[in-house]
């Protein structure tokens, strides 16, 4: 039996090295397209300010009291920041095929002797790191505009929800990334439609309680709903990890189900795309 060290000595990289190669490649692409990153950063800041200023307008019109205004500001600010994070992860991972087509490397990448799970792992880790960095920058630029009180926040619980919830979001993003494989002409647009549905039903800017009954039922199928509930509970009400048990368990279940399912579905879609000659098509 040939040992793993022997394979490495022959120049065959370990799985972690292969995953890092995709991570590093996305960093280089990010540097190349830094102007687009600046565009999305400015858009994220403006969107955060525009949505959160709604609470300030409500306060100026004396519709609710000052204490309620402070809570509404935090409610909307958390929603916009969490959505900035989620949409960045969904973009980076669901566009895994789009990136390859834009760069003209789709045949090289999908024909390379690299396990698809390693490829998707590298892209997913980059997506999470990229989303974290962008969201932190948006918060840093938007926070000075508002009087934010986080004295009651439980940061450990909030980070736990984000960490566990990110796994399930990655699974959802990989599923969305299958669409460009199946439909080269319309797949990217269909991936954005998935984001739109998640935005609608997950309670980003409002409580899911205001949705019609049938949409409330759909909201329970979105991991973003539980992430938002958990983060708001930790930041607004100071709920600890013990009080987050149900939410953390639900997010864990989503992750355990969605990630293997999405990787298996991606492999089947890739096989079908190769058989039908859809890899190189741009539309």
Image (spheres, grey):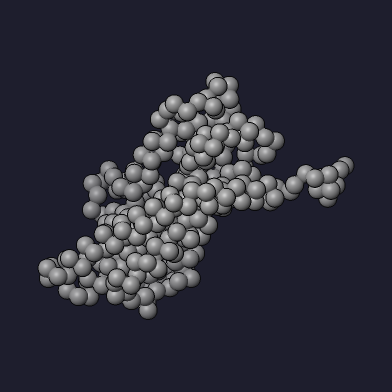
Residue 265 in view here: no
Position of the N terminus by quadrant: top right
Q: Residue at the location (40% across, 57% down)?
A: 41
Position of the C terminus by quadrant: top left
Instruction: State the residue lying farthest toward the right.
Output: 1
Q: Position of residue 263 (x, y in %)?
A: 56, 40
Q: Residue at the location (31% across, 57% down)?
A: 47
Q: Position of residue 36 (x, y in %)?
A: 43, 49
Quarter of the view holding residue 272: top right
Q: Is residue 71 above or below residue 268?
A: below
Q: Position of residue 279 (x, y in %)?
A: 55, 28
Residue sitting nearer the eye, 283 or 241: 283
Residue sitting nearer the eye, 240 or 126: 126
Q: Residue at the location (84% across, 48% down)?
A: 9
Q: Residue at the location (34% across, 54% down)?
A: 43
Q: Position of residue 176 (x, y in %)?
A: 45, 39
The answer to whether 281 appears left or right of 227 in the picture is right
Instruction: State the residue lying farthest toward the bottom.
Output: 151
Residue sitting nearer the eye, 164 or 23: 23
Q: Is residue 117 above or below residue 232?
A: above
Count of labels shown?
A: 0
Residue 93 in view here: yes
């Amino acid at each position: 039996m040939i040992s793993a060290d022997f394979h490495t000595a022959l120049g065959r990289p370990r799985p972690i090295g292969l995953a890092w190669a995709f991570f590093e490649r996305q960093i280089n692409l990010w540097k190349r397209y830094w102007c687009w990153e600046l565009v999305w950063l400015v858009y994220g800041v403006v969107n955060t300010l525009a949505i959160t200023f709604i609470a300030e307008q409500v306060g100026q019109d004396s519709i609710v009291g000052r204490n309620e205004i402070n809570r509404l500001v935090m409610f909307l600010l958390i929603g916009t920041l969490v959505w900035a994070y989620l949409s960045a992860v969904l973009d980076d991972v669901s566009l895994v095929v789009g990136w390859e087509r834009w760069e003209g490397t789709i045949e090289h990448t999908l024909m390379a002797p690299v396990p698809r799970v390693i490829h998707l792992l590298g892209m997913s880790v980059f997506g999470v790191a990229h989303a974290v960095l962008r969201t932190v920058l948006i918060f840093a630029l938007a926070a000075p505009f508002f009087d934010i009180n986080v004295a009651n926040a439980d940061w450990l619980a909030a980070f736990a929800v984000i960490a566990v919830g990110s796994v399930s979001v990655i699974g959802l993003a990989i599923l969305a990334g299958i669409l460009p494989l199946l439909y080269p002409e319309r797949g990217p647009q269909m991936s954005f439609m998935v984001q739109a549905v998640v935005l609608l039903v997950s309670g980003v800017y409002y409580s899911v309680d205001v949705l019609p009954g049938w949409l409330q039922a759909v909201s329970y199928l979105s991991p973003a709903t539980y992430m938002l509930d958990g983060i708001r509970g930790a930041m607004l009400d100071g709920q600890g990890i013990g009080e987050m048990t149900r939410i953390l368990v639900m997010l864990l279940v989503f992750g355990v189900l969605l990630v293997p399912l999405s990787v298996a579905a991606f492999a089947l879609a890739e096989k079908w795309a190769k058989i039908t000659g859809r890899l190189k098509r741009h539309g």
